[in-house]
């Protein structure tokens, strides 16, 4: 199989590879594809970036001993473990697999396709506030931290097309990650934009489709087309 002929299969394998559920000969063959094929390397990078983003900020917590003891008692594992010494490790491995597959299904449900451009919006001191990923037909906006602002105001994102008026890309999320479908006008505006801007607007965004305040942040839009 040539990877370039089966992009959907490669995307699925890339996700399994990053999660660690692709094993043995299949993993070794996939690693060779990754080294030799830009498409495979790109999909691996996508899943690495997004799965790591999912894990970012999670703090490992060691449960107190009585929690595991209670689980063992309720499931009668103590007696079963005498017959099956490897049982606790098997349960732990199964739980890990379930968590990994859940993450895979989550990201597959929101994965928007091929990234075409990216912008990182940061303070003058370099603190990252938002990352905007542009795909064919959608935006994915990741919020790192939101600057202080009035409760009755929103941050609105704008494309700045060359020789044209700003085009609204919608209100920025207050936290986490948000995905938004692009209209044809927004796609065209992004295609001719080298920068994105952020303004402070009333709740819900500008009422007239144009910025009502001076941009507080302007960031370059970097092409990701290979």
Image (tube, rainbow, N blue to C red):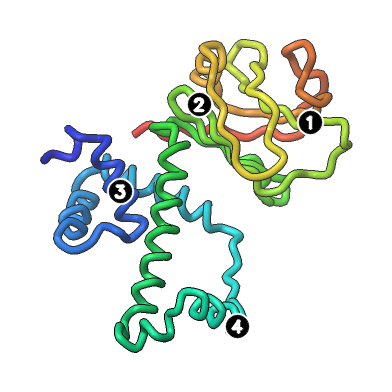
Q: Quadrant of the N terminus?
A: top left
Q: CA distance from mark 3 to mark 2?
A: 22 Å
- Eye-nearest disc, 4 or 3: 4
- Helix or strand or loop: what does disc 3 sit on? helix
Q: Mark 4 to mark 1: distance in Å?
A: 46 Å
The mark closer to the camera, 4 or 1, is 4
Give the spatial CA distance, label 3 vs label 1.
Answer: 37 Å
Identify the residue position indicated by label 4 in the image: 66
What residue did someone put label 1 on? 154
Q: Please tell me which residue is depicted at 20% across the width and 35% down the height of the picture.
A: 6
Residue closest to the eye, 220 or 117 = 117
Tell me which numbered mark, 4 or 1, is placed earlier along the sequence. 4
Whether residue 202 sits left or right of residue 112 in the image: it is right
Q: Secondary structure at mark 2?
A: strand
Q: Which residue is mark 3?
A: 14
In the picture as drawn, the residue positioned furthest to the left comes out as 1
In primary-sequence order, the first of circles 3 and 1 is: 3
Image coords of residue 206 (percent x, y): 77, 18
User: Residue beneath label 2, please?
Assistant: 138
Marker count (numbered): 4
Q: 124 or 203, which lies in front?
A: 203
- Residue at left 50%, top 30%? 134
Q: Residues within 10 Å of mark 2 (few under 14, many from 20)?
A: some
Q: Is residue 53 left or right of residue 41?
A: right
């Amino acid at each position: 199989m040539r990877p370039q002929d089966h992009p959907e299969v490669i995307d699925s394998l890339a996700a399994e590879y990053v999660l660690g559920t692709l094993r043995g000969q299949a993993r070794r063959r996939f690693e060779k594809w990754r080294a030799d094929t830009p498409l495979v390397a790109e999909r691996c990078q996508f899943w690495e970036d997004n799965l790591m983003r999912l894990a970012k900020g999670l703090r490992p917590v060691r449960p107190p001993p009585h929690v595991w003891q209670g689980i063992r008692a309720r499931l009668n594992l103590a007696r079963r473990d005498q017959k099956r010494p490897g049982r606790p490790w098997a349960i732990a491995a199964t739980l890990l697999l379930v968590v990994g597959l859940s993450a895979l299904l989550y990201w597959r449900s929101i994965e928007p396709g091929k990234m075409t451009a990216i912008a990182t919006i940061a303070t003058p001191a370099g603190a990252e506030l938002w990352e905007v990923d542009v795909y064919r037909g959608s935006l994915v906006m990741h919020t790192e931290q939101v600057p202080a602002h009035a409760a009755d105001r929103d941050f609105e994102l704008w494309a700045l097309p060359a020789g044209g008026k700003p085009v609204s890309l919608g209100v920025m999320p207050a936290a986490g990650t948000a995905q938004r479908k692009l209209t044809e006008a927004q796609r065209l505006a992004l295609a001719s934009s080298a920068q994105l801007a952020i303004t402070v607007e009333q709740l819900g965004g500008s009422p007239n489709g144009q910025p009502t305040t001076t941009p507080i942040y302007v960031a370059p839009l970097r092409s990701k087309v290979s």
